[in-house]
Amino acid sequence: MSGLHSAVLVIATLTTGLSAGLFFAFSCSVMPGLRHSDDRSFVQVMQWINRKILNPWFLGVYLGALILDVLAVVLRWGTAELPWLLAGAVLYLVLVVITAAINVPLNNQLDAAGEPERPAEVRAAYEPRWVRWNLIRTVAVVASFAAMLAGLVAA
């Protein structure tokens, strides 16, 4: 295994783990904490989180993990660890697809609501669906990280 191949696999696993940690933190702390906030506070906080998360650190890790996971698959084609890496890349892609198809459109709808007159209605249209799909994408990215770790160990 070349140094480049090793570096790609380690960095792919690391960035996947960082993404898994972020989504896990939202599932087990941020959203349960916000569940106990009033409707107006919930809407405002989620609007600010959704705006502020779009930064170079997050986007670099989030998109970088997908690119590096796929690159690790390509570089490790035909090796014993390939099935793990392929599973990791596919599961990470599940995260990206759910995010793009469900969570981002919900975030955009929430942002478009501005400072709503009826924050309870805005929250009711957003929170249950967003939380449900966030949990599903969290399971996918944590499984992706586990698969990438297994691939790293097998390498």
Image (cartoon, helix red, strand yellow):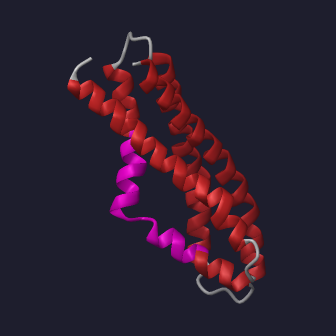
Residue at the image position 28 percent from the left and 32 percent from the top: 7
On whether residue 65 falls in the magenta region, the answer is yes
Q: Does residue 63 appear left or right of residue 120 in this picture?
A: left
Q: Does residue 11 appear left or right of residue 28 in this picture?
A: left
x then y, percent, for residue 71: 33, 29
Residue at the image position 50 percent from the left and 17 percent from the top: 83
Residue 54, located in which quarter of the rendered image? bottom left
Q: Does residue 93 appear left or right of residue 125 in this picture?
A: left
On whether residue 7 falls in the magenta region, the answer is no
Residue at the image position 69 percent from the left and 73 percent from the top: 34
The C terminus lies in quadrant = top left
Q: In this view, does 101 lie above or below 90?
A: below
Front position in the image: 38 or 100: 38
x then y, percent, for residue 141: 56, 42
Per the rendered image, the range of residues in magenta is: 46-66
x then y, percent, for residue 91: 55, 34
| Residue 126 seen | no
Magenta region, main secondary structure: helix
Front position in the image: 139 or 90: 139
